[in-house]
Amino acid sequence: MASPCCPRFSPLPAGPAEWGLPSRLPTSFSVRGLVLKCNVEQERETGNGRSGVSFKGAHNQWVQDTLTEISVWLEKHPREVVPLACRNFQGLSTDLHKYLVTCIQNIFGDMLCPRGKICPFPEVPTLHLLWARSQKVIIFYEVEDTVSQHRELSPGVCYWWGNKVKVQELIRYLEGMKSCSRPGGLFVAGINLTENLEYILVHPCESLQKMTVPEVPYLSTWVRAQCPGPGSRCTNVIAGDFIGTDSFVSDVIRLNEKLLWC
């Protein structure tokens, strides 16, 4: 998979309290030719005081409901492959890790791509091999101990997260990472702007959406200039926020056409 694309979040309704809320990802997917990465993180609020696990972007929704919806969507789209990145597990108990893995196993079953089984370089399976085996889900799990116990899980992928408020600084960070050569296997170049405390204090009534959307055209220009493939400066997975506001999805899919010129 030379250049899969990963839309991460869609916008929340605007409001003063938005800085404290996770973005919400719609789970009714309708995009073809797209590989979707989603994050799993510890639930911030369950509404009933219980600790739990949430699918990042599905606020106050239990993880199995969202994973089930992805499974149903995949049944209807046999040519799609979905890498799911499970990460941000700070404070998650051993029992909840077991619960999450059990949900993944029960919901996806034979759709899961076991590591080390489908090709000599299991971290970079080809689409043709996945299609031939009807394996549609690759699980990247951030906890090594859990990965070692389950062949359905693969180690977490590298994420280039700039942690920048200004788009120009984010682009400089990404270009700097490219100049240091890409990691082996799948990795994520994040075009995600990130608020900091100073920005929030100066803009208390804004939101991540209001900060990001005006910069989407600038970010899209960077996306369109990328090249897929195995080269040292090539991108692999691109992740962005509020991707429904611009041509991000079609831009990334169109990057694959550059492979035809090689």
Image (cartoon, grey):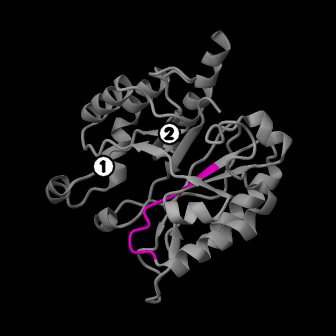
Tell whether position 29 is magenta.
Answer: no
In the image, residue 114 lies at what x, y percent?
A: 71, 53
Q: In the rendered view, does 242 fall on the left or right side of 104?
A: left
Q: Quadrant of the C terminus?
A: top right
- Verify whether residue 84 appears in magenta: yes
Which residues make up the magenta segment?
Answer: 83-92
Q: Residue at coordinates 31% horizontally, 56% vertically from top-left?
A: 207
Q: Nearer the viewer, residue 200 or 230?
A: 230
Total count of labels: 2
Q: Could you tell me how far apart the alpha carbons at marks 1 and 2 are, in whole angstroms? A: 19 Å
Q: Position of residue 151 (x, y in %)?
A: 68, 58
Residue 19, quarter of the rendered image: bottom left
Q: Residues within 10 Å of mark 2 (few under 14, many from 20)?
A: some
Residue at 39% over, 74% down? 91
Q: Which residue is mark 2?
A: 187
Mark 1 nearby-residue class (10 Å; few <14, some 14–19, many ≥20) = some
Instruction: Kindly identify which residue carries mark 1.
Output: 194
Query: Residue 27 at what x, y percent from top left?
Result: 63, 58
Left/right placement of residue 119 relative to residue 237 reads right
